[in-house]
Image (cartoon, rainbow, N blue to C red):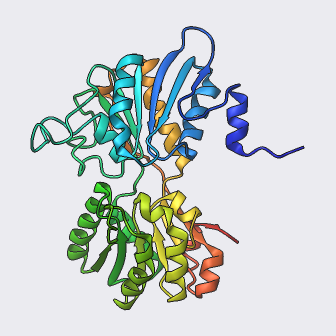
């Protein structure tokens, strides 16, 4: 008998297969409809999201679409949302949320600067790393418009403290994708915060190829250049392209005795980063689901439900990487850190 993965088991328990473009029902009494727009297909975030409603027995129908990392698909999806007229729209990530919810009208620099596209129904976003810096919302808390959601990134100052708890630092390197707006914002914040904390930030944007896409062939040279600046850590920010090549990047960095700090759970799990302070994706999905529940079953307007960061994070250390690099955490750090990869 074949073993089922957690996601396959969850999908089976909901008695439906989920492919991009499929619907999923929970319960049978006039289910509410949630139109889900994903960036790169389903993740552990959606596992937690679906599980929340399955366990609560709440009648819902999910219509799932994925951009598959191609924002040019947004117009067709927006047309479908208008045609389907769902009760709520779920958006995953900064690019998707900007394309559907747009910037807050009072924060946009011009009418063409990501205008809100869906304004006649509630939108709940998830996995937006910098909702304030992206100008999707003016501040954490109620938004005053048809948008609420969840951010999954630990505040950068807290991330710096996490790095400092492992060892003293005076410089950090980061490699990022200049075409990903959230990544650019994070690097800007890193540099500004580094100045205040007297920590030098050396940033290395990934060059673009002839088609305007980030060039993976440039990564070995970038890692080499980053290592030569003498940082204590290579910072892996919430960057989709860097996440895709995180294992290659961290393997190259480790060969140069440069340990990596991961800002997201999936980046830590899929690479050879030494450690990270991360938001568990399944918990992000459940927290997002709780906001959807308040809108659809608690009859609360999205504009009154606060945008929040996940209230709990996990300090995770890769024991196997620590052994390979011979960079071990202090005993006091092990009092609260979770050791993985043993």
**At which x and y percent is residue 228?**
37, 91
Q: Residue furthest top?
A: 29
Q: Quadrant of the C terminus?
A: bottom right
Residue 221 sits above or below residue 308 on the image: below
Instruction: Identify the residue at horizontal 47%, vertical 46% (top origin).
Output: 68
Q: Residue furthest right?
A: 1
Front residue (pair 296, 20): 20
For the image, the number of numbered tags is 0
Front residue (pair 123, 303): 123
Q: Residue furthest front?
A: 210
Q: Quadrant of the N terminus?
A: top right
For the question of whether residue 85 can be seen, the reply is no
Horizontal placement of 149 versus 64: left or right?
left
Horizontal placement of 316 versus 152: left or right?
right
Instruction: Identify the residue at horizontal 40%, vertical 72% (top origin).
Output: 235
Residue 117 placement: quadrant = top left
For the question of whether residue 235 can be seen, the reply is yes
Residue 155 placement: quadrant = bottom left
Residue 222 sits above or below residue 110 on the image: below
Instruction: Identify the residue at horizontal 44%, vertical 45% (top origin).
Output: 39
**At which x and y percent is residue 20?**
54, 35
**At which x and y percent is residue 234?**
42, 77
Residue 239 sits above or below residue 95 on the image: below
Residue 89 placement: quadrant = top left
**At which x and y percent is residue 92?**
42, 41
């Amino acid at each position: 008998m074949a073993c089922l993965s957690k996601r396959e088991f969850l999908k089976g328990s909901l008695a439906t297969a989920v492919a991009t473009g499929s619907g999923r029902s929970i319960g049978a009494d006039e289910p509410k409809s949630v139109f889900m727009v994903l960036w790169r297909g389903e993740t552990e975030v959606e596992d937690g999201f679906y599980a929340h409603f399955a366990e609560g027995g709440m009648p819902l129908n999910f219509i799932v679409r994925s951009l598959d990392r191609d924002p040019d698909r947004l117009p067709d999806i927006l047309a479908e949302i208008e045609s389907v007229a769902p009760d709520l729209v779920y958006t995953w990530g900064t690019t998707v949320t900007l394309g559907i919810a747009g910037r807050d009208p009072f924060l946009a620099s011009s009418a063409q600067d990501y205008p809100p596209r869906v304004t006649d129904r509630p939108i709940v976003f998830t996995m937006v790393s910098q909702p304030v810096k992206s100008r999707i919302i003016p501040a954490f808390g109620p938004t005053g418009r048809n948008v609420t959601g969840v951010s999954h990134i630990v505040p950068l100052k807290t991330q710096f403290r996490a790095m400092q708890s492992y060892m003293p630092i005076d410089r950090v390197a980061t490699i990022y994708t200049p075409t990903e707006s959230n990544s650019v914002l994070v690097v800007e914040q890193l540099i500004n915060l580094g100045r205040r904390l007297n920590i030098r930030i050396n940033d290395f944007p990934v060059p673009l190829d002839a088609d305007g896409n980030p060039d993976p062939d440039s990564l070995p040279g970038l890692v080499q250049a980053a290592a030569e600046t003498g940082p204590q850590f290579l910072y892996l920010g919430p960057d989709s392209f860097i996440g895709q090549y995180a294992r290659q990047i961290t393997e190259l960095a480790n060969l140069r005795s440069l340990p990596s700090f991961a800002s997201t759970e999936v980046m830590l799990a899929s690479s050879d980063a030494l450690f990270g302070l991360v938001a568990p994706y399944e918990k992000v999905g459940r927290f997002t689901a709780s906001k959807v529940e308040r809108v659809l079953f608690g009859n609360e307007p999205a504009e009154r439900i606060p945008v929040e960061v996940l209230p709990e994070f996990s300090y995770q250390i890769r024991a196997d990487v620590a052994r390979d690099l011979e960079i071990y955490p202090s005993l006091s750090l092990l009092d609260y850190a979770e050791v993985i990869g043993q």
